[in-house]
Image (spheres, rainbow, N blue to C red):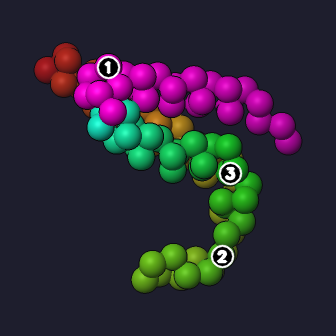
Amino acid sequence: MTMGWNRILSGVLALGYIVFGSVAGGAEGAFIAVGFVIFPLVCIWFSEAMGGYTGIAGDIGITAPSPGIFVCIAGWILLFLPIVIAMIEWFS
């Protein structure tokens, strides 16, 4: 299954975060933004591979694979989380 639109939209959003971090906080802000967007992008771009992982993850063992679509959805939730938090703070 090709996930071209997921990759394009998430890449554009991630690039927006990095540019915003660069404008707001300089090189340090951009570096923090890159650190934030790496994991959600990997979850979205490589959801099938990430969902198929079983083994040891920290102190817990992953005993069964997860459907790739759930990993992709979780990546999108993580990627949109700063926008949701900013909107909550803006309107309260």
Q: Looking at the image, which is closer to me, 58 or 18?
A: 18
Q: Position of residue 72 (x, y in %)?
A: 62, 45
Q: Position of residue 88 (x, y in %)?
A: 24, 25
Q: Position of residue 37 (x, y in %)?
A: 47, 41
Q: Position of residue 71 (x, y in %)?
A: 61, 52
Q: Residue at x 60, y 49 (%)?
A: 42
Q: Is residue 83 left or right of residue 67?
A: left
The answer to which of marks 3 and 2 sits earlier in the sequence is 3
Identify the residue under disc 2.
54
Circle 1: is it few (<14), some (14-19), or many (20+) Cα within 10 Å?
Answer: few
Q: Is residue 38 left or right of residue 2?
A: left
Tell me which corner region of the image, top left, top right, bottom left or bottom right, holds residue 36: top left
Q: Is residue 19 above or below residue 72?
A: above
Q: Is residue 65 above or below residue 3?
A: below
Cα separation, mark 1 vs mark 3, equals: 31 Å
Identify the residue under disc 1.
23
- Image disc number at residue 47: 3
Tell me which corner region of the image, top left, top right, bottom left or bottom right, holds residue 27: top left
The boundaries of the magenta stretch are 1-27
Q: Nearer the viewer, mark 2 or mark 1?
A: 1
